[in-house]
Image (spheres, grey):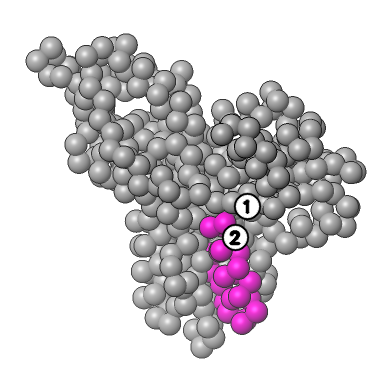
Amino acid sequence: MTTVNEPVEIHLAHTQGFCAGVSAAIEIVDLTIQKYGIPIYVRHEIVHNTFVVNEYKQRGVIFIDELSEVPDNSTVIFSAHGVAPTVYAEAKERGLHFIDATCPLVTKVHMEAKKYSRRHIQTILIGHRGHQELIGTEGYVDPKLCHIVEDESDVDALNLDPSQPIGVLTQTTLSITDTKKIIDKLKTRYPNLISPGQQDICYATENRQNAVVDLTRVCDVIIVCGSPTSSNSNRLCERASEEGVPSYIIDSPSEFNSDMIKSATKIGISSGASVPYYLVEEIVSKIKTIHPSATVHKEPSIEGDIWFPVPKELRDIQSSITIKSS
């Protein structure tokens, strides 16, 4: 147990709050509401965070699973996770007004997938079956060439023709260490494996995982703020555990309890790329009610200068807001 002679420290991961892709997706929804009004439809959760989604529901945004749920002549936004080409085709066929909030880093993977199929390359997609991002990327691959791998055991089940080209692509929110193990195993089995010039795991995922590893070097326990549907948030919790530090993932500050930190003097806090920073601040406040003299440590974020543009049709609204606020 912590004693008065053991001052408590709270260490925040140096990378917190929304990544550029999430920030852009949220801004797209906000600008779309201002330009076109409610109701606005969003295909699947715009980002995987309970608080973000619930806030938009309260504002009148309607989240749907399939385009068949969108009334004619309506506006629909495609989520940051991306969609398959068939979804664009369906929207065009129905004459729906659609706005694409796909993260540019996911779009990059889509372009690689298309290129592989044009070249008749057998394509291994590493990712979580059923995750919206992987479903979208799979849609860009010729079904006859597509093979999904979730873990190392799936590599053993592959039956590819080694005399023909084989390429690999990954979901952007995976564990860096797990993905490396899978790719290393693939390269052992298929030495001529083709991969993109740069890894598909996005900068935000990598930065947050590296930040958690940094926390494990000084902290007794790590709290990860993130929704259970968030792949990158779950990977943060797993990464901390891999380093031998107890970790807990909580969707809401209300899920935090003192038992999580009862024997800790150095408490680490991280959060997923789709988590509003105010949730992290609320967790800090809860800890400080238990340890009022606790000190908070945080290094500057390394992502401050990264941003993605919104679609052209929304930039007039974006400009007017900038002018009003200046």
For the magenta stretch, what is the residue range?
Answer: 104-125
Task: In this rendered view, identify the residue nearer to me: 39 or 235.
Answer: 39
Residue located at (51% from left, 78% from top): 166
Q: Position of residue 99 (x, y in %)?
A: 73, 49
Residue located at (20% from left, 21% from top): 8
Q: Earlier in the sequence, mark 2 or mark 1?
A: 1
Residue 102 numbered mark, or none: 1
Amino acid type, label 2: Thr
Q: Is residue 162 above or below residue 123?
A: below
Q: Is residue 166 above or below residue 132?
A: below
According to the picture, the residue beneath numbered tag 2 turns out to be 107
Q: Position of residue 101 (x, y in %)?
A: 65, 49
Residue located at (53% from left, 57% from top): 105
Q: Is residue 9 in the magenta section?
A: no
Amino acid type, label 1: Thr
Q: Is residue 223 visible?
A: yes
Mark 1: give few (<14), some (14-19) or many (20+) Cα within 10 Å: many
Which element carries disc 2, helix, strand or loop? helix
Q: Is residue 109 in the magenta section?
A: yes
Q: Quadrant of the N terminus?
A: top left
Residue located at (60% from left, 38% from top): 322
Residue 242, quarter of picture:
top left
| Image marks 2 and 1: residues in contact by CB distance under 8 Å | yes
Q: Position of residue 88 (x, y in %)?
A: 76, 57
Residue 289, quarter of picture:
top left
Q: From the image, give the main secondary structure of the stretch colored magenta.
A: helix
Q: Is residue 172 above or below residue 158?
A: above
Residue 219 numbered mark, or none: none
Which element carries disc 1, helix, strand or loop? loop
Q: CA distance from mark 2 to mark 1?
A: 7 Å
Q: Is residue 316 above or below residue 181?
A: above
